Amino acid sequence: MDSTARYNKAIADLTENNQQHLLAFYDQLDNISRENLLCQVESLDFPEINSWIRDYVLNESPLEVPTNFDPASYYPVDPKDDNQAQIYDNAVNLGKKLLSDGKVAGFVVAGGQGTRLGFDGPKGNYQISQIRKKTLFRLFAEHILAVSAKYGAKIPWYIMTSPLNHSATLELFERNTYYGMDKNDVFIFQQGTNINFSLDGRILLADKCTLASSPDGHGGSLRAIYKSKALQDMQQRGIEQLSYWQVDNPLVHLFDPLFIGLHALEDAGMSSRALIKAHPTEKVGNFCLVDDKVTVIEYSDLPDDQAHRQNPDGSYVFELGSIAIHIVSTSFIDKLNSAGFALPIHRAVKKIPYIDPSGNTVNPDKPNGVKLETFVFDALPLASKSIILETLRQEEFAPVKNASGDDSPDVTRKMMTDRAAAWLEKAGIKVPRKADRTIDCVIEMSANFAVCADDAKAKVETVPRIKSGDSIYLG
């Protein structure tokens, strides 16, 4: 079909679906731009798009929040009795074996930019360590290499980017020679996108030849793994379990044998780390049971009376917070996609730049459109089994999101020092503290030194005496 016939068909399809404005500037474009625009229009699935407009764009409350739900059960940080202690021991042994047998891989969701941090570029390139100024990507790579050495097996790393930073991320890894990892053990792929709509259901134009779109959310990771053939690569390597985390959290225990082992012992499809919320309305998802399935209800959707509901001992009934740390079985990902991938769609009203009918770029000062995305935790109730393991905030949750205040670099760096100090003190090393018991030094602990507290015990003799005001790097 020649370009004229393609244009005629495209304008007919668009007119039928009230989206003819997408070709308003066609006559002003060069041939390459025309081809680019036609390809985008031809890829539109109008039956699906029209259902999105009806159900999610024009409908301001598309998702039905469950009204009947119970608190989810979980494995505590420490076993509650001898029987559970035996289960934990068995799980640790199984987790170590899976690591040693090369059955586990790492997967980081890294599609975000550092905009909120005042940083230009992929968030993974943000320098977060206090002394050596290591980036998030470098810290994760060193952690993977250290665990690989510890268990005598290569651990591959899968990294999901977005169209916002894919090229920049590839360039970063090339320039930094994959942070010491074998290039063949690093698989970088892009997540999908969804088109953006005006509040009245019209598809927005980002420029005269480009439909406005945005990443399809971290839930899209489970589809992108499949479409990019990353899952096929995992299957060829014999990978059975995938450790999932988000790029902004440098404290994550990437490969905890207990977590991996409990997940495998239960034959779970997807499992989660959780922490006890700091207060009833903390802005994290809430782990609940809906129809006997582990489900996350967002903090904004949990009724206030339920958020403050207490047990007889004074603890909160819905105390478990979701922190985006998971173990996912590759067989579960395969099943999700083979059965026709479908996670609930979430509606987000945002400020979306666009081209107006006169061809001018508009940067709105208030929300003007709708982005559609999926969340990875919505896959939990689709798993036949899902377990939750409690973790401690100070051990593995210090996301760096904001330039100042909560979840800022200053808070994250302090928590990195605090955890390093706690591990050293557990090993019997004296760490200077101020009168208020806060740490009176800076400690940067490389994964080459320790990936868990027990590793630090074996390095006691290598640690110099630490004095007040010191800056100590342990590598």
Image: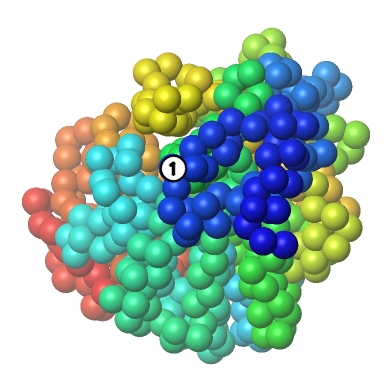
SS for tag 1? Answer: helix
Q: Position of residue 251 (x, y in %)?
A: 42, 54
Give the residue pinned by disc 1. Answer: 28
Q: Which of the 4 image quadrants contains residue 292?
A: top right
Q: Nearer the viewer, residue 287 or 461?
A: 287
Q: Quadrant of the C terminus?
A: bottom left
Q: Which of the 4 image quadrants contains residue 180?
A: bottom left
Q: Which of the 4 image quadrants contains residue 326?
A: bottom right
Query: Which residue sits furthest top?
Result: 305
Q: Quadrant of the N terminus?
A: bottom right
Q: Position of residue 90 (x, y in %)?
A: 74, 70
Residue drawn at point x = 10 percent, y = 51 percent: 468
Q: Nearer the viewer, residue 461 or 29?
A: 29
Q: Nearer the viewer, residue 439 or 83?
A: 439
Q: Position of residue 106 (x, y in %)?
A: 56, 69
Q: Is residue 435 visible?
A: yes
The number of callouts visible is 1
Residue drawn at point x = 75 percent, y = 40 percent: 13
Residue drawn at point x = 80 percent, y = 60 percent: 337
Q: Residues within 10 Å of mark 1 (few under 14, many from 20)?
A: few
Residue drawn at point x = 80 percent, y = 66 percent: 334
